[in-house]
Image: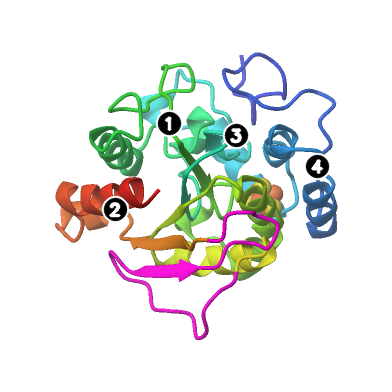
Amino acid sequence: MANAPFVPPGSGWPGDPATPGTPVAHDAAEVIELAAKSPGLDELCARQSVCRACDRLVEWRERVAVERRRAFADEEYWGRPIPGWGAAEPRVMIVGLAPAAHGGNRTGRIFTGDRSGDWLFASLHRVGLAALPTSVHAADGQRLIDTRVAAAVRCAPPDNKPTPLERTTCLPWLAREVAEVAPSVRCVVCLGGFAWQAVWPALRQAGYGLPRPRPRFGHGAEVELAPPSSVPRRDPVLLLGCYHPSQQNTFTGRVTEEMLDAVLTRARDYA
Ligand code: SF4
């Protein structure tokens, strides 16, 4: 049987939030409209997971799903955008840049099935924010505890580099997700400098009060944000910077287990 470019919505993939009837965004204007009019978090994630607004990324994610890496040649690839995942009312929100071609794009779950995710989930487990130390496939029983993870760009990009236009096109999905979970979120953790840049406009659109100028990204950088006026609780929300646990960073020792644990422990304790 020929490899399929993507898993059909609602066809039984574990955790698939969509159905065959989930509306599909085909361009930037439709992303704005479908994100704004989504009736809630579950439907928002369903709509994220079937989006086709960026031609280059749709072509890439589906080509990767058809060609596959030799190590995963027998596996079906998800081949769709990766929706936000985790607690519906999280206290900690973690934001990365984009899924990996043979990680999230294969397994359908954020940070799942790649080396960066191995580091992240091991750390989340050590500090008590994930039920298991690994996250390998969508039916592995992993569960986040009071925590949610989302990407600023939902589709795997070539060379892990989305274009500025792709970031802008995908922004409404993140902005609406950030707004949906704002009533419970106490801490936002950005994995890497690109996520730090990308989350800023999403926080602004969600109604957070942001300092000017924008503070520099760094490992352990902390910024206090005023919550959106729609949130009754008025104490500040903490924005935290964390180096990305990419292979390059972990191989070179720029990021260690202790460094990841320190930031996530700070997030847990603040939240
Ligand atoms: S990157 Fe975002 S906006 Fe672009 S196709 Fe994927 S989900 Fe849609």
Which one is closest to the eye, mark 2 or mark 4? Answer: 2
Spatial CA distance of label 3 from label 4 is 23 Å
Where residue 113 appears, as percent x and y from the top left, is: 39, 32
User: Which residue is denoted by mark 1 in the rendering?
Assistant: 144
Q: At label 4, which amino acid type do we have?
A: Ser
Residues 243 and 236: in front is 236
Helix, strand or loop for disc 1: loop
Which residue is at a point 72% across and 40% down the rendered structure image? Answer: 44
Which residue does the numbered mark 4 point to in the structure image?
38
The mark that comes first in sequence, 2 or 4, is: 4
Which stretch is magenta?
Answer: 209-234
Q: Which amino acid does label 1 sit on?
A: Leu
Q: Does the residue labelled 1 lie within 8 Å of ligand 1?
A: no
Amino acid at circle 3: Gly
Q: Do the residues labelled 1 and 2 touch (CB within 8 Å)?
A: no
- The secondary structure type at the circle numbered 3 is loop
Query: Is label 1 or label 3 in front?
Result: 1
Compared to residue 140, the image places residue 104 above or below, namely below
For disc 3, the marked residue is 79
Residue visible at 67% across and 46% down in the picture: 180
Residue visible at 64% across and 62% down in the picture: 228
Residue 266 numbered tag: 2
Q: Where is residue 167 in the image (x, y as percent from the top left)?
A: 62, 63
Q: Earlier in the sequence, mark 3 or mark 2?
A: 3
Q: How far apart are marks 1 and 3 (CA)?
A: 23 Å
Circle nearer the N terminus (1, 2): 1
Q: Position of residue 84 (x, y in %)?
A: 57, 40
